[in-house]
Amino acid sequence: MSNEHDLVIIGGGVGGLVTASAAGQLGLDVVLIERDTALGGDCLHHGCVPSKTLIRSASIAHAARQARDFGINAKVGPTDLGAVTDRVRAVIERIQHHDDPERFRGYGIDVLFGEAQFRDPHTVSVKGRSIRGRRFVIATGSRPAIPPIAGLDSVPYLTNETVFDQRALPGRLAVIGGGPIGCELAQAFARLGSAVTLIEAGAELLPQDDPVLTRQLREHLVAEGVAIRLNTSVLSARPEGDQTVLALQADSGTEAVEARFDRVLVATGRQPNTDGINPEAAGLERDQRGALIVDRRLRTSRRHIYAVGDCTGPFPFTHMAEYQASIIISNAIFRWPRRADYRAVPWVTYTDPELAHVGMTRKAAEEAGIDHQLVTFPLAEVDRAIAEGATTGELRLLVRKGRIIGASLLAPHAGEIIHELALAIAEKVPLHRLAGLVHAYPTLAQISKRAAGSYYAPQLFSSRTRRLVKWIHRLLP
């Protein structure tokens, strides 16, 4: 039997790496186990990094095609997806240097590659090696959730794990799923030159976001050429030569129609990676999705075993895994009790314009019976947006007792702008402080100041205030 290590971390994505780095540099005896052949996790290899790199290439192609609208003559030829893919690979490789196993071994961490499986609550095995630990961190991430579509396994469908390896641009692309991944890649491939059909079973895209803004975004995507089919189920898939035939049903009880595509991208959500670690042997409790159940200190049903990131939730974001790692570092390493706080978690869908949110949604506020006011401000009234020729969007603030409790923004670079509002929510900054803060002109970020100012405008310019101003000017020289 091997010696008992201070900390055993299963998973080499962001959550596992952040925890391992801190523990190793603090002198703990750490073992880091990664199932795949490289560190970095889904975000680096199949998610955030490749998708945003592809989106950037698509935005350049789109800008070139729109150049005449800005007084520039430019010609754009067909997209060389192979060249785009090469750039995606190059970006991944550059960032991969930060996740070099030797860097972590330099911190004294034992880095192992292979599948880790629990044998009991204090022991895992990796390629026949038994490893015991005082405490464990599970950071095994998630994988694409594949819907039960008849015949889907008979066609060469794509997911986020395979789409970034493609070198030939599909002429006709079906994207199944209207969540963030589906929307982002549907727009990106349309901008690169594919004829894209986005298929969503629900009544609207991005159901977790503000419905007013998702409708605006949908209209924008349609204007760019993305065909969107809502309330549509995919009943079956079958190969036909080099193409895939999908049977689509618009509404229950209606006759299905067939549509042919060169490729199909499945983007119907994520599934926690917990089956492979043999959680039953450790006595770990999971929910219906298979996610590990944790408390606010991110402890599982076994208090010495923690979980971080997509394998536990509640938000499948890289920045959430990084934040949760800081909670685990406090609890598992410093033994200082600290609870996760999800009141001000921002999320972003990286379409163009971007759709960002932080805090409570209006639906959540109404369901909780929280009295609030809705403050809106259109992007079309922001001078920088007019200059940029990008006026699709709006800021929507939920305000309670003079403080922001939720914010949704559809705008270029919304993912950058939202952090000012996230700080206001997290620190309970009064809205008048935001209204009075000096913002550089002209910037898109002025929309936050303008929206905050509009909240006070009715009171400032009321008849009562007008009488007060007249009274002051009569009494004072």
Image (tube, grey):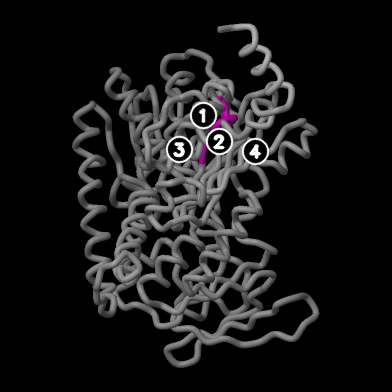
Q: Disc 1 vs disc 3: Cβ atoms closer than 8 Å?
A: no
Q: Disc 1 vs disc 3: which is toward the camera?
A: 3
Q: Secondary structure at mark 1?
A: strand
Crowding at mark 2 (Cα within 10 Å: few <14, some 14-19, many 20+): some
Q: Which mark is residue 305?
A: 1
Earlier along the polypeptide chain: callout 1 or callout 3?
1
Q: Secondary structure at mark 3?
A: helix
Image quarter in which the N terminus is found? top left
Q: Disc 3 vs disc 2: Cβ atoms closer than 8 Å?
A: no
Residues in magenta, as a range: 340-346
Crowding at mark 4 (Cα within 10 Å: few <14, some 14-19, many 20+): some
Mark 4 to mark 2 CA distance (whole Å): 49 Å
Above or below, comparing residue 338 to residue 206 in the picture: above
Return the residue at label 2.
282
Q: What amino acid type should be assigned to the residue bearing mark 2?
A: Ala
Counting from the top left corner in percent of width and height, residue 460 is at 64, 26
Q: Disc 3 vs disc 2: which is toward the camera?
A: 3
Q: Disc 2 vs disc 1: Cβ atoms closer than 8 Å?
A: yes
Give the residue displayed 26% in from the left and 67% down from the top.
Answer: 84
Above or below, comparing residue 140 to residue 263 in the picture: above
Q: What amino acid type should be assigned to the residue bearing mark 1?
A: Ile
Query: Is residue 242 in view?
Result: yes
Q: What amino acid type should be assigned to the residue bearing mark 3?
A: Gln
